[in-house]
Amino acid sequence: MNSKQLFEKILEKRSFLCIGLDTDLKLIPQSLLGEEFPLFSFNKAIVDATAPYAVAYKPNLAFYEAYGSKGIRQFEMTVEYIKKNYPDILVIADAKRGDIGNTAARYAESFFNAYDCDAVTLSPYMGKDSVEPFLGKEGKWAVVLALTSNKSADDFEQLELANAKPLYRQVIETACTWGNVDNLMFVVGATRPEKLKEIRNFCPEHFFLVPGVGAQGGTVEEVAEAGMNAHCGLLVNSSRGIIYASKDDDFASAAAAAARKMQEKMDQALKKIS
């Protein structure tokens, strides 16, 4: 899926919602714990309930790797289920990989070929050769960490360089020379809308994956006002606020209601450009 096709899907669904599948056995309903694949059972119900409102799902690898091979199998099952039943929805592997070129190439093969994900989150700390292997397959995306929403992001990301630019700006500007609007996105947190607006000014065309809406305090309205461009250019992620809208057996319907509420806000934002 390229940027034009992604925008078309956004317009069709009137949504730029990405749902994070940060599925934790400690938080899912007790009634699922006796099943052979409880993570997958939870994910399947969430996906079926929220698919009308989402243009992307983002399973976080840590929540599957924590349970060893059985957890990884349930990650695979989740991706397979989405690709089979909702092939027009983007699957972003939230893996935050970042390594030297030959290792990065194997990671790219893993996520794009073995798992058939559409995108992977990446740390650019090691430079071009840690990202470039993810840019060579048509329809696939590298999602590069730029300015994140976690509390300790300022430890490095906002440090001023010798050229007077903050590190996150140098990362974005340099990475833009590696890829293009059809294979490169940036992670920009929702909790600092003023920074999001600044980044949109010097990076006008690329899609941003925006975490931090909902449980972390960001809002759809602020993100859209600061970061939307003429082709939307945003995938706004919500994880806990949707998938754990209820911890009881009505979790799927509660997730659908939470997703629909966000989609309605996104529809209002999209009316300004379409």
Image: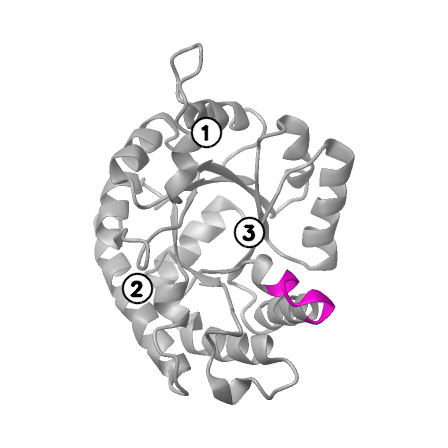
Look at the magenta stretch and give its main secondary structure: helix
Q: Which of pointers 3 and 2 indicates the residue nearer the eye?
A: 2
Place of residue 123 in the rendered image (x, y in percent of width and height, measured from the top left): 57, 38
Measure the C-alpha gap from mark 2 to mark 1.
Answer: 34 Å
Of callouts 2 and 1, which one flags the residue occurring earlier in the amino acid sequence?
A: 1
**Bounds of the magenta span?**
64-70
What residue type is disc 3 on?
Answer: Met
Place of residue 150 in the rendered image (x, y in percent of width and height, measured from the top left): 40, 45
- Looking at the rendered structure, which numbered label has been put on residue 156? 1
Please report the residue visible at 53 percent of the width from the left and 33 percent of the height from the top. 180
Q: Secondary structure at mark 1?
A: loop
Position of residue 70 relative to residue 134, above or below, is below
- Looking at the rendered structure, which numbered label has been put on residue 1? 3
Of callouts 1 and 3, which one flags the residue occurring earlier in the amino acid sequence?
A: 3
Q: Is residue 223 visible?
A: yes
What residue type is disc 2 on?
Answer: Gln
Circle 2 residues within 10 Å: few <14, some 14–19, many ≥20 = many
Q: Which of pointers 1 and 3 indicates the residue nearer the eye?
A: 1
- Looking at the rendered structure, which numbered label has been put on residue 263? 2
Q: From the viewer's perspective, is 111 left or right of 246?
A: right
Q: From the viewer's perspective, is 5 left or right of 103?
A: left
Please report the residue visible at 76 percent of the width from the left and 44 percent of the height from the top. 106
Measure the C-alpha gap from mark 3 to mark 2.
Answer: 21 Å
Position of residue 166 relative to residue 216, above or below, is above
